[in-house]
C-alpha cells in the first residue's frame, strides 16, 4: 500500500463546512468536525455564528434543556413561540453566561421603539431599514410592554423597573440580538391582529 500524503488547504475545508451549514447538512458538518476538530470551524465572534434561530439551536445542541423545551411546544400562540425561541437564541449568544441577578451585575436587554403609522409613513426608506422596522400590518401597535422612554427636564431618559430573563452579557450582544432577530422580538412584544 502506498503511503501518499494528501494536502488539503484550510480555506477549502472551511468553504466546504460553510456550504454544508447553508444546506443544513448536519451529518457532513459533523464529519468535518470529527476529522479536523470542532474548534477549526467555530468563528471567534458569536455574532458570526448565530445568525438564525436554527444556528442557535445547533450551537446549543439537541440535549440542551431549552432546546428540549422548544420541541415540546405545539400549537403555541405567536408570543409564546417567540419567547421560547428567544430563550434559545439568548442562551446561544451568551455562550454559557447566565445572569445571577446580583446588585453589582450588569445585564443588557434590547430596546425597541414603537412608532405610529403616521411616523412610519413619514420616514425615509433608509431610516426604516436602519431601524429594522417590522411589518406593522400584522400587529396591533397601540400596546406593548417592558420598556418606555419619556422626556422631562433633560432631552430624554429611559427607565425600567422589572428585570428579565432575556438579558445578555454585553450591550453589543443586546444590540445585535434586537436587530438580528427583530421579527421574533416583535412577535414576543406586540399583539398580533386577529
Image (cartoon, rainbow, N blue to C red):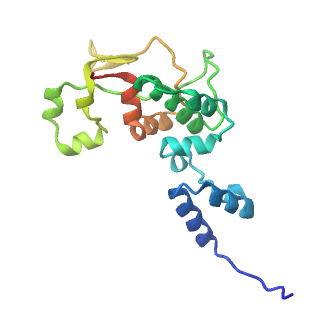
Q: From this viewpoint, is residue 169 visible?
A: no
- Judge left or right: residue 30 versus residue 174: right
Image coordinates for residue 55, horizontal then vertical, percent: 54, 46
Residue occupying the point 48% across, 12% down = 162
Q: Work out whether residue 145 or residue 3 is closer to the camera in this orientation and state it.
A: 3
Q: Residue furthest right?
A: 1
Q: From this viewpoint, is residue 1 visible?
A: yes
Q: Work out whether residue 150 or residue 27 is closer to the camera in this orientation and state it.
A: 27
Classify 143 as above or below 4: above
Residue occupying the point 27% across, 12% down = 153
Image coordinates for residue 190, horizontal then vertical, percent: 34, 22
Q: Residue furthest front?
A: 75
Q: Quarter of the image containing the N terminus?
A: bottom right
- Judge left or right: residue 53 versus residue 59: left
Q: Work out whether residue 149 or residue 141 is closer to the camera in this orientation and state it.
A: 141
Q: Quadrant of residue 101?
A: top right
Q: Quadrant of residue 145?
A: top left
- Judge left or right: residue 9 versus residue 120: right
Q: Residue furthest bottom?
A: 2
Image coordinates for residue 60, horizontal then vertical, percent: 63, 40
Classify 125 as above or below 100: below
Residue occupying the point 45% across, 29% down = 82
Residue occupying the point 27% across, 21% down = 194
Image coordinates for residue 6, horizontal then vertical, percent: 73, 81
The number of numbered badges drawn on the structure is 0
Amino acid at each position: 500500500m502506498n503511503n501518499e500524503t494528501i494536502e488539503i488547504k484550510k480555506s477549502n475545508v472551511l468553504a466546504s463546512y460553510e456550504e454544508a451549514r447553508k444546506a443544513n447538512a448536519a451529518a457532513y458538518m459533523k464529519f468535518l468536525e470529527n476529522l479536523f476538530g470542532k474548534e477549526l470551524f467555530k468563528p471567534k465572534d458569536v455574532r458570526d455564528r448565530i445568525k438564525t434561530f436554527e444556528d442557535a439551536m445547533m450551537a446549543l445542541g439537541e440535549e440542551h434543556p431549552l432546546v428540549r423545551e422548544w420541541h415540546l411546544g405545539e400549537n403555541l400562540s405567536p408570543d409564546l413561540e417567540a419567547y421560547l425561541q428567544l430563550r434559545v437564541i439568548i442562551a446561544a449568544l451568551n455562550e454559557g453566561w447566565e445572569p445571577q441577578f446580583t446588585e453589582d451585575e450588569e445585564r443588557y436587554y434590547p430596546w425597541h421603539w414603537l412608532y405610529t403609522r403616521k411616523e412610519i409613513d413619514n420616514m425615509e426608506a433608509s431610516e426604516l431599514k436602519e431601524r429594522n422596522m417590522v411589518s406593522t400590518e400584522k400587529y396591533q401597535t397601540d400596546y406593548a410592554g417592558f420598556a418606555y422612554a419619556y422626556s422631562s427636564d433633560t432631552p430624554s431618559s429611559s427607565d425600567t423597573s422589572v428585570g428579565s430573563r432575556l438579558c445578555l452579557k454585553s450591550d453589543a450582544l443586546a444590540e445585535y440580538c434586537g436587530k438580528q432577530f427583530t421579527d421574533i422580538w416583535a412577535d414576543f412584544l406586540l399583539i398580533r391582529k386577529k
